[in-house]
Every structure is written in C-alpha cells, then in structure tokens.
Image (cartoon, rainbow, N blue to C red):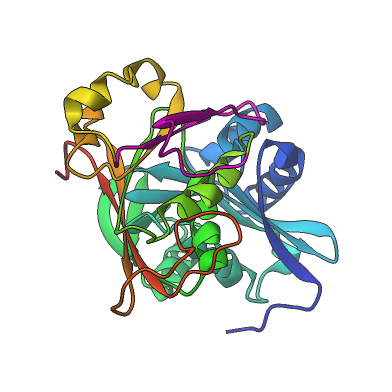
Amino acid sequence: MSRPPAGLTLERVGAEAAESVYAVVQAAFGARPALDPPADALAETPASLAVSLGRGRGILARLDGEPVGALLLDPRDRTLFLRRFSVLPKAQGQGLAGRLLAEAVAAAPAHEFLTVLARPELPATVAFWESQEFVGTAEHAPFLELRRELETRHAVPDAEAMRDLGHRVGLLLAAGDLVILSGELGAGKTTFTQGLGAGLGVRGQVTSPTFVIARVHPSLVAGPDLVHVDAYRLGGIDELDDLDLDAALDEAVTVVEWGEGIAEGLSQRRLEVRISRAVGGEPADGQGGEPGEELDPRVVELRWVSPATS
C-alpha cells in the first residue's frame, strides 16, 4: 500500500463544502468508463450535495490545499452507507482511498456495518472494496452491495475521548432520533452528551439536567434541537409521559440519561448507549459528567434498535 503523500489533509465537512465536493465528484466519476445506466453521481448538483452533506456528513481530502477526494456518509440505523466515494485520477495510487475509508470507519462508532454500492462493470473498484474486507451481500441491479463489519464497543480512556465519541455520534444524528444512555452514577453519560451536543451544534453548555429533569438546547446551525432528559428521579414511563416529550420527538434529537427500562416506549427506533468502567471500583468524587472532570477508562457499547432488530 502506498504511503499517503505529505500535504494531505482530511476533514469532516457539511453543506458549506458542497461546491468543493461537487467538483471532486464530477471530475472523478466523469473520468470513469461510460456506464449504462450512467452513474447517479453525475446527476448531483451543488444544491443536492449540500442537502446530503448536512452538518458534517462528508469527508473531504485536500492535497496541498486542493480538494482531491471526497465521500458522503449516509446513516441508516445499523448501517452507514458510503456514497460518492471519489478520488481524482491525478491523486490515485497514493493511498488516498485507504485514508478516506479509515476516516469513514472513525466516523461510524455507532454503526455495525459500512456498506457500499459498486458497479460490477468496474472490476478494479469491486476488487478495491474486497481488499478492504468488504464482502458482497446482495445485488440491486445495476449495483453490487458490499458490506464490512464494524466494532461498536469502544475503549474510552478519558473525558476528552468520551466527548469526542459523542461528537462523532452527534454529527450523524437527525431530527427524530432517540438516544438512551445507561451506566452507573458518574459513568460519563453527561460527558458523552456534551460531545453529542457539540456535534449537533446546539446552544448552551450541556450539564446534567437532574434538578430540572429536561432541558432544551436550540440548534445554532439550522439542525435539530437537543432535548436532554435525566430520568434518574422518575418513577416510570407514566412520569416520563408527563414531560410531554412526544411534542418534540419528531423535530429534535432526544437524549435520555438513566432511560433504560423507561424510555424505550418513546420510539421503536433508538440508539442505546451503555457505559461501563473498564476496571472495577467505585465512582471517584467529581466524576458526575460535569465540565473539567477526569474520567478513568470506560467501555462504551452502542447499538441501534429498530422494529427489524429488536
């Protein structure tokens, strides 16, 4: 495998980078052999890509500042689809495709699979995905679907890493998503939610809502608001229903700490986040999830649940 060249940078991007992503996609797909039917990517416009990119659902590669590679991240519960995977011809053969894929893996901590659709008429493309541990799972003419399993159990060494994990999850959440957090007192649930709120781009410092039960953080980026709920002092689903969260469920991302066994009834589709200590022991003072805390190592397990998987 070629070593990526010096001067190569990769970053998560959103709608603001639509023009750059469009230029890369058109040049890369336009250089491929003609297909029948033509590649869907050639019908993209900057406007359509801006919608797909959202807050941060793209990865853009630059070489000495010039865009040379791109892809779109399309989350579908357990699966993260990779769309418009593009490398300019002049940048190929330098390990860039592998770097883009590695960034996609890092962007998908809550997904069990990465999935791509490839055209069988392009055997070199199919061979690349197979070399990266993707396995053909289905045919959807004119595409071959290939899938790679991902790890959804993550070792998290400290509070900064916990926020980073939450941030990566938050970038791929959308209005209507429900997140249920479980873990012992001081496990880092609020720390995770701080990162998630940063990924969503919401206003206000995310702190434990224990004494107000629920707090709303409005979006600063025209995305969904964050509704942050602490169910620790709630007696059950009836008291949770009294909060009237249904009014916000379809328009916001709702995060419920201590929600296991209580909040599942809010939605048949949800992301369950379970946090545990990597080593035994009692919670240390000051490890309640507030800014500035220091967490000892944690293990975070993430699992999407929907009618098809529950």
- Residue at (55, 42) in percent of width and height: 206
Q: Is there any visible trace of residue 200 in the rendered image?
A: yes
Is residue 57 among the parts visible in the rendering?
no
Q: Residue at 29% of width from left, 61% of height from top? A: 136
Find out whether residue 107 is within the magenta segment. Answer: no
Residue 306 image-quadrant placement: top left
> In the rendered image, which quarter is residue 282 located in?
bottom left
Reply yes or no: does residue 224 show up in magenta. Answer: yes
Q: Position of residue 69 (x, y in %)?
A: 68, 58
**Is residue 29 left or right of 113 when viewed as pictured?**
right
Residue 151 pos. (x, y %): 34, 67
Q: Which residues are magenta?
A: 205-232
Q: Identify whether 224 is placed above or below 247.
A: below
Q: Would you place residue 265 above or below residue 68 in this image?
A: above
- Give how far across and how far down residue 201 sits, in percent: 62, 38
- Residue 203 found in image quarter: top right
Residue that appears at 42% across and 49% down: 81
Q: Which residue is depicted at the point 14% across and 43% down?
A: 310
Between 307 and 62, the one nearer to me in the picture = 307
Q: Position of residue 253 (x, y in %)?
A: 44, 32
